[in-house]
Image (cartoon, rainbow, N blue to C red):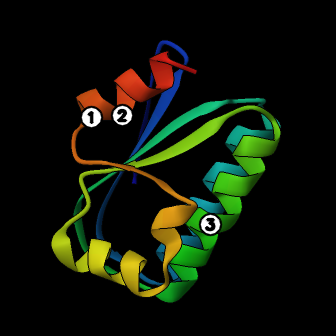
Amino acid sequence: MMCAQVGEVHVIKLSGTLGYEASEKLKESLVALLEKKTKKIIIDMSEIEMITSGTLGIFYTANKDFEVVGGALILVGLQPHVLSSIHEWRLERFLHIYDTMEEARNSLNRK
């Protein structure tokens, strides 16, 4: 997991498999950003090979938490198998998903 800040936007780049340990680290990072009053998060998932339902739950909960404080959590670059998992759980109704980083940034600029 790599984190970077570009202006007001925090970008988290994930890679590999999002199993239990990686998901817990991600959850800790998101909680820390929320505590710092960060409002604009983009999670780059273009290099994710596998994702668990627990990780999807973390995204769902974190998205709600950021929205409560007027923020946004955006997922970008999802591989087809990851997007399929999101559709299976019908989470596309709750998560902000974009194909490219440019689309994600443009979305945040409108907020």
Q: Amino acid at mark 3?
A: Tyr
Q: Position of residue 43 (x, y in %)?
A: 42, 48
The answer for how far apart the CA atoms under marks 1 and 3 are is 20 Å
Q: Which residue is mark 3?
A: 60
- The first of marks 1 and 3 along the sequence is 3
Is label 3 in a helix, a strand or a loop? helix
Q: Position of residue 25 (x, y in %)?
A: 57, 65
For residue 106, side relative to residue 55 (left or right): left
Q: Which residue is mark 1?
A: 101
The answer for how far apart the CA atoms under marks 1 and 2 are is 5 Å
Q: Amino acid at mark 1?
A: Met
**Label 2 packing within 10 angstroms: few (<14), some (14-19), many (20+):** many
- Establish if 5 lies above or below 43: above
Q: Which residue is mark 2?
A: 104
Please identify the quadrant where the N terminus is shown.
bottom left
Q: Amino acid at mark 2?
A: Ala
Residue shown at the point (66%, 30%) measured from the top left: 39
Residue shown at the point (36%, 34%) measured from the top left: 104
Label 1–label 2 contact, CB within 8 A? yes
- The first of marks 3 and 2 along the sequence is 3
Residue shown at the point (70%, 65%) measured from the top left: 61
Res 71 label: none
The answer for how far apart the CA atoms under marks 3 and 2 are is 17 Å
Is label 2 in a helix, a strand or a loop? helix
**Label 3 packing within 10 angstroms: few (<14), some (14-19), many (20+):** some
Res 49 → quadrant = bottom left
